[in-house]
Image: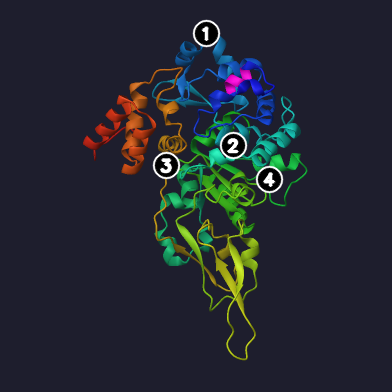
Amino acid sequence: MGHLFNAKEEYLDLQRRLDQTQSGLPPSEELYDILKILYTEDEARLAATMPLKPSPLSAIAKQTGRSEKELEPLLDRMAKKALVFDVYREEKKEWYYVISPPLIGLFDVSAMARKRGDIDQKKFAYLYHAYMYDRAEFPKVFFGGDTQSGRTLVHETALEQGDYTEILSYESASDLVRESRGGSVCLCSCRHEAMHRGDACRHPMDICTQLNGGADFVLRRGIGRKVDTKELLDIFAQAREAGLVQICDNVKNRPTFICHCCGCCCVFLKGINTLGINNAVKTSGFLAGVDTAKCVGCGKCARACPIQAITMVAVRPEPGKKQPIHSWVDEDICLGCGVCADTCHKDAMKMKRRKEKVLTPESTLERILRMTLERGRLQHLIFDDQAGLTSRFLNRLLGAIQRLPPVKRALANEQIKSRFINFCINEVKHREGEDVVEY
């Protein structure tokens, strides 16, 4: 259907390639205009032929038919623009590159820079907003599975002492910050994009935080500034006081970002508020509940909730008394963020553990595998039609498949009718309990 759009072949090929990532990227006129803003024609040609997994310069040269001498400065330039991600692998003593997925990657990192002379940021902001919220095909694909890129962290200040002592380390923003030993901070891409459209909100903009590999990339490319553990913890405290939702990279080990999100700008929360996609971000392991005996019906919690999960309801009054009202929480959509509990000064809003455990992928690879599996793109991850698979990647893939529930293993078998997947799944059955290489 590419001929229906007014775009050069380079950008049509690039869209098709990006559509094979875990995010997906449906075509539209707005999208091709966005790609033309972000990529030169030569960059688009290269990105359209790059591997979908992190690869060294030699592998990219072999796949694209370009020399390493030609590729190295071009990839470095593209990494500065967040068109590709680069990471140095110490064990190999070389740089690896991978094409940036649309989210979390190309779109949001491109909007983090305060001022860019190479692109029209205002035009990009309007096109991006139209593609995301007017067309909405992309967010429906991106948020179309059970596994999401982001997960909610409960405000630790909203927990009672007994619950706080039981919080798991990957559920605690403070623990994640301390384990990372510092990170980086830069502009919130969502609020920056809104500002360029003349729709900025009152919340702080210079607040988006990155940890571990995310901080390494942002600092190396001059997008943000380095911050130590103490300053990060201060930023998190300020964000909680401002009533912002803390949304983390949806992995247990070495998350790359924690955003401080508002319901009016955040791409995750607007997926819920604007598009009605209630699972656009994974919930925390907690749930808000109301102590009706303490609730005075002031409505502060309902006004503070970033996704309107709290409403005020009337209850039958006792004879001779005024009809009271109290808060009611829609548990089907509650994020478990704790913003409401922090807002309540009557100790009426409580955070409690959910009855059902919230699954969090162990690693980035496991999250990507789950996302591609649920969105029908697993075949692109396993069978990259432009590159062969290495034994190392297969080992990691097998390790991630091993952690999938039986139902999703069966789904993988149904999605790709091949002896290879049958072999992997059968191999998993025989290798239960054995150690595998982690991502």
**CB of mark 2 within 8 Å of CB of mark 1?**
no
Q: What is the CA distance from the residue labelled 3 to the residue labelled 1?
A: 36 Å
Given the image, on which type of amino acid does mark 1 rest? Ser
Q: What is the CA distance from the residue labelled 2 to the residue labelled 3?
A: 28 Å
Badge 1 is on which residue? 67
**CB of mark 3 within 8 Å of CB of mark 1?**
no
Q: What is the CA distance from the residue labelled 4 to the residue labelled 2?
A: 25 Å
Residue 19: % across, % down: 54, 28
Instruction: Tell me if 151 is positioned left or right of 121 in this view.
Output: left
Given the image, on which type of amino acid does mark 4 rest? Met
**Magenta stretch in the rendered image:** 10-14
Q: Nearer the viewer, mark 2 or mark 3?
A: 2
Check residue 205 in the rendering and tell me which mark sits there, or answer none.
4
Residue at the outermost right position: 198
12 in magenta: yes
Is 14 rendered above or below residue 398?
A: above
Helix, strand or loop at mark 1: loop
Residue 362: % across, % down: 39, 42
- Magenta stretch: dominant SS? helix
